Amino acid sequence: MTLSRRLALAAAFLAPLAGPALAQTQITIQHPLPLNSHYGAGATALKEAFERASGGRYNVVIQRNDNEREAIESAQIGTIECVVTSTGPVGNFVPETRNLDVPFLFRDTAHARGVLDSEIGQQMLGRFSARGLAGVVWMENGFRHLTNSRREVNTPADIRGLKVRTMENQVHMRAFSTLGALPTPMAFSELVPALQQGTVDGQENPIPVIVANNLNQVQRYLTLTGHVYSPAILICNPGMLARMSAADRAAFMEAAKAGAAANRARVTSDEQSGVDELRRRGMTVVTQVDAAAFQTALAAAFTEYERTLDGALLRRIREWR
Ligand code: PAF
């Protein structure tokens, strides 16, 4: 065999091995929930849309990290590229987002999605760049409800004295201390051991989270308080976006929107089936909740939010139609 023929054969043999590894850029997205969850649905839809649009030049890897603050820090320093997170710890990075964490701010899901997709939400995404992060798209966690292992919660008074795990979020903590609970902030990764060991009596999360994480195994009572809407957000490392070509960046943004649509659709379906599923798994569910009574009990917290947050923005959000 001639030398040129031998070289041609060697090149043909090596090309499939070397080609994809050299050409592919990896994007790691972390999120705190099981793959079979509303965040997993969003991340998977983004992965599929972007890998398809980029003709396989990008490989999107989805990982679980149930410490949201850590994951945001990793995206900030660039050890991962993106994170899907609730706004729980986000106010510690971008303080303006705390306005979205105010209890009973949003009337319903349509109101919340409308505000986040409007100029208000888009301007808020723009705030991330000053903090070394890129706010890419709003996703959704859902309206949060209270669970506990001690008693049925029917009225605000029933919350008094309960040790409730909250997110590391001062707006939420203030609400629970105003209701007379003992708010205990911790990362989601610490929640189940804390419930098992009785360090806390209860926690609050949307139905899709309670279902996906089998919290019924450690909590008996669920009250559909819907006390606060919990936005989720896709945050990325700005350097990663800057390194993309304009066309790839546009495709990534489109894929992120497809991810948000899939995530929201999954929240809607989990909320429709989740309460029955949790009853089937043995939880006692209180569905009749006097939201006005909870809002009255929170009066002192609302006065503080008006003073410490952006009162004008809160009014704009409340009045949004
Ligand atoms: O409770 C939390 O920390 C969040 O709601 C969770 C479950 C990590 C989802 O973002």
Image (cartoon, rainbow, N blue to C red):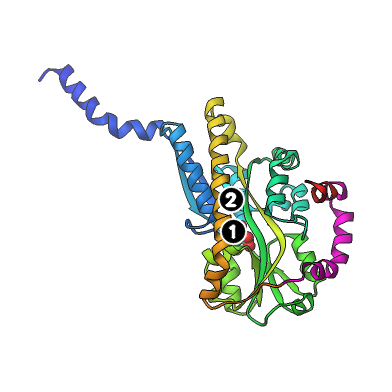
User: Image check: 266 left or right of 55?
Assistant: right
Whole-number angstrom distance, CA of label 2 to CA of label 1: 22 Å
The answer to whether the beta carbon of the residue marked 1 is less than 8 Å from any atom of ligand 1 is no
For the image shown, how many numbered marks are present on the structure? 2
Residue 205: where, in percent of width, then height?
64, 64
Q: Is residue 58 visible?
A: no
Q: Earlier in the sequence, mark 2 or mark 1?
A: 1
Mark nearer the viewer, 2 or 1 = 2
Q: Nearest the camera: 21 or 279?
A: 279
x, y percent for residue 267: 58, 56
> In the depicted view, which residue is nearer to us: 174 or 210?
210
Q: Label 2: few (<14), some or many (≥20) within 10 Å? A: many
Q: Nearer the viewer, residue 80 or 201?
A: 201
Q: Which mark is drawn over residue 264?
A: 2
Q: Quadrant where the N terminus lies?
A: top left
Name the kind of residue labelled 2 in the image: Arg
- Asked whether residue 298 is drawn in magenta, I would say yes
Q: Which mark is residue 88?
A: none
Q: Tell me the residue that label 1 is attached to.
A: 67
Instruction: Indicate the quadrant of ligand 1 in the picture.
Output: bottom right
Q: Mark 1 falls on what kind of element?
A: loop
Going by the numbered disc 1, the residue's amino acid type is Asn
Q: Which residue sits at x=32%, y=32%?
A: 18
Stretch in magenta: 289-314
Name the quadrant containing residue 181: bottom right
Q: Is residue 210 magenta?
A: no
